[in-house]
Structures are given as C-alpha cells and as structure tokens.
Amino acid sequence: MFLCQPLLDVLIGRGVEDVDSFVQTPSWSALPDPLSIPGLEQAVDRVYRGIRAKERISIHGDYDCDGVLGTHILRSVLSSLGAAPRAYLPHRDEGYGLSANQVHRLSRAGTDLLITVDNGINAYQSVLLAQRLGIDVLVIDHHRIQERAKTLAVWSPEFCGAGLAAIFGWALASRAGWKDGRVEGLLRGLSQYAAIASIADCVPLVNGTRTLARLGLGQLAQARHCGLRELVRVSCNDPARPDSHDVAFGVAPRINAAGRMEHPALALAVFEAAQDEEAARKRVETLNQLNLERRRQVGLEFKKLTDSLHHPIPAALAVYRASCPKGIAGLLASKCVERFSVPSIVLVPSSTPGFVQGSGRSVAGFDMVEGLRPFQRFLTRFGGHAQAVGLTMPRAHVGVFEEEFVRLVESAGLKPESGLRAEAEIILPMLGSRFNEQLSQLEPFGEGNRAPVFLLRMVEIQSVKNRWVRIRQGGRSMEALSWDVPLSEGMRGDCLIEFYGKRRILREFRDQSAPASRPV
C-alpha cells in the first residue's frame, strides 16, 4: 500500500522493515497457532473433558477491563459448548488475585474445575489450597511470574488476559469439532473484546497482540451483541468507525469505572444483555454515571496531589494519599507519569487495617516489577508487568519505602524526558480523508505502537476555547485538543501534534516571539 511520506518516515524511524505487511489488513490466518502457546493444548483437553463430564466449572476474573472481558469470553465460549460456568469477579476491597477466602467460597459452591483469567500465575498458596480441597485449577494469565503456581497454566507475556482467553476459546471450539467457518465466526466475536482489553491493559501492541487487536477493532462497528453495541454507541466519537482512541478513552474507562467505583459485576452485566436492548441501555447508563463520578474524583484528587508536591520533581514519585479512594490510585499514577515523565507510585489506605495498597506506572526504560524487587522486605505482595504494578505493604513502611524507591531510580540514572520528539514533519494541506485512511492502517495505537507525533512549522493559533484550539498554516486550519500547553490567540510558532486516530492532540508549542523553553 502506498503511504504518504510522513507516515512512511514514522514507520522507518521505528525500525519497521516490512512496511507493506505492517499496514495490510491482516487475515484471521495471520493469528499465531494457538498450540504454539505453552500449556494450551493440555489446558484445552482438560476443560473439554470437564465439559463432557458436566463438571461444575467456575471462572475467577479480575476487577479491571482485562479481567472482566476475559471472564466474559470464557463464560460465553464454555456456555456455547454446553457448560454452565459460574463467573466470579472480586471486589477491589478483596485485593487482586485469587485469595484463600475466595477459594473456600468456590469450594462451598461445589466447584470441580476453577479457571482463573488475568490472575493466578503467582497465587501459589491459594492454588495449593484449592487442590487440597479437591478443585482442579487452570490458570490463564500474562503477568510476570514471581512464585509460579504449580498447576496447569496457559501463560504468555505477549497477550493480555482476554487475548489469551480468546485464543483459548478458539482452540477449545476446534477441539470440540466445530467447523472452520463456525470457529472463525466465534473468533470474530471474541476478538472484539480482546481488542478492547489489549488497548486498555497497556500490553505491547506488536506481533500477535497487534494482529488480534486490529482484527477485533475492525469488528466493533459490526457488533451484534446488544450490550457491546450500546457501549460502542455511547463511548465512540464515530461508532461506525471506532479507533484505538475511542477504546482507550471511551469504552475501556466505562468498563473500568465499575470496579473502581462500585463492583466489576456491573460491567460484566452489560455483556449479559446479549439480545435485550433496553437492559443494555440501562446497564451502560450505569457505567456512564460511574465513569462521570470517576472523572470528577480523579480531577479533584490529582489537584490535591500535585499541590502537595515539592519542586523540582525528583527522579521518581512514591506518594501516600490518606483520603484517596483506592479505585483511582492507578489513574493518579498514570497522570503523574503523563505530567512529570517519572516512574510513579500512588499508595492509599487498604481495607485491611494497618496496611496500604497502591498502583505504580512507569516510563520507557524502567521496569516497574524489577524496580520493586529490592523492596520485597517491605511488600506483602506485588506484581504486574514492566509498565504497571499493584502492591501492598504495612502502613509503617511507607515513609522508608517512599525515600528508598526514589533513591533507587536516581541511582539507575533514569532521566526525566524533556518532552516529545517529532517523528516526521507534516503540513496541513497533506491532511484529508486519504491521509486519515492511511493513518488508520497504523492502528491500533497504544503501548508498543504509540500514536505518531508530527512537527508543524509556522502555525498560528486562531482560537482557544476550553481545551480546543484551532491552528492555521497558510490557507488551511485544523482543530486539536490541548492539555497543559499555555496558548492564546495570535501566537505563532512551531508545534508538535499527536495524531491519535481521528483525534489531533497538541502536545507542545514553541512561541517564536519568545525564547524557546520546551525544545521541539
């Protein structure tokens, strides 16, 4: 496919050697062979035997978008194969992952086979307890292994939990004897949920994950499931052509809002409304309201947090917020990373007296899981992946941990980024429907495949209204969103614009009438 020069420059600059393959719409045959994932064949055989024997199967997910959608995928596939699985999602107060209390609850419910998704690979003691209670356990997970549970597992860091669940469902349907056409139809449906979770969970959008997410993103506009269709309708700027920006900032936050503000079961309920449009509308509206409250609380708490910081900002942030709701700690950490470009951890009170829990988010070049390993003497538990972690510790250790974490990052020589860098130069006359179509071939954007950033020279700020700014270059103009960039009408200079799907986001501006303080 022919690409305009700026987009071609972006891909070449990122080291993409086969540009044609990268931009071509993939076929379903481009997905990796499910059986190439270690443990998957044995896991499929075990679950298929359980279905045939009419065992009581339980699914244990997680309270975030990946865990909710992974649970929905497994439940829908197992149900279509004749099983009657029970789905359990923990409340955030119960903590991340499979706990002893949850194992006892599942045992009392008569569970024969327990499948965990997006958790479980490090639940060594809880899995052992389940086995002693006569429950077989299958783990489907992607998190970094620390103390691997001794049980049957489908584990890969290449996919998120829902992505692994979709591939597992594909293989299970094939094992059950479904014909190719029916299997592909199933995979089309599952890929939609895997795409949302892959973009939301910050797994690298490369290789098999990019293929699965790109295929699923293309299916979202054709969603037949009432709940998913309504969620796409209210969350996306253009429901007929959803892109990764719509998913990252529209669909996923609504799903996550349930677990952050109330209970993740409210999000799972949306995907139970397969054919009931009225029920789907009401359940999605519930998520809408929870998301609005989530946004209000994040804005309030982030202002309090930034007001409490001392400047200059150190090489890392580790802050305890005694009054902050636990459900938004990860969002505050993400905003700290976005604002200050340093690894950030936000700690909040735990539901267990005397303990705190928190979330960490990182920057390129700093592996958060590895960075926390030296502090295991402080931590009751921690886990995640390079860019995002969760952790728990006694409240008494917080002060020392905050100081030592900052010192560790300082000793690593990690420098705060001085700002974005343009990947190519572009002029406004190049933009239009053809450019937008070509840009969409680079989707989905996210971790490992970021939205491209372009330099526009000698533009004029025509108007500024709230967060929207109109810029002009020659006889052409364009609207863009702007955060934390001081602008006023009439300013002239160069700017950096992030092209995130159909959104244009002004990230930096160099006023030519004043000394440049933020280099382009």
Image (cartoon, rainbow, N blue to C red):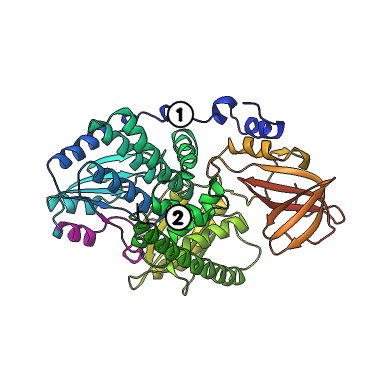
Q: Is residue 99 magenta?
A: yes
Return the residue nearer the eye: 155 or 348.
Answer: 155
State whether residue 235 is above or below residue 436. Answer: below
Asked if residue 370 can be seen in this view, the reply is: yes
The amino acid on which the numbered mark 1 sits, given as a three-letter code, is: Ser
In this figure, which residue is indicated by the disc labeled 2? 230
Q: Position of residue 346 (x, y in %)?
A: 49, 63
In this figure, which residue is indicated by the disc labeled 1? 27
Asked if residue 381 can be seen in this view, the reply is: no
Return the residue nearer the eye: 200 or 341.
Answer: 200
What residue sits 46% from the left and 74% below the top?
Answer: 322
Q: Position of residue 487 (x, y in %)?
A: 77, 60
Q: Which residue range is magenta in the image?
A: 87-107
Q: Could you classify mark 1 by the number of other residues whose Cα lies within 10 Å: few (under 14), some (14-19), or many (20 or more)?
A: few
Sequence-wise first label, 2 or 1: 1
Q: Position of residue 188 (x, y in %)?
A: 40, 38
State whether residue 131 is above or below residue 329. Answer: above
> Which label was assigned to residue 1?
none
Q: Is residue 404 magenta?
A: no
Q: Which element type, helix, strand or loop, lies under badge 2? A: helix
Q: Is residue 419 left or right of residue 51?
A: right
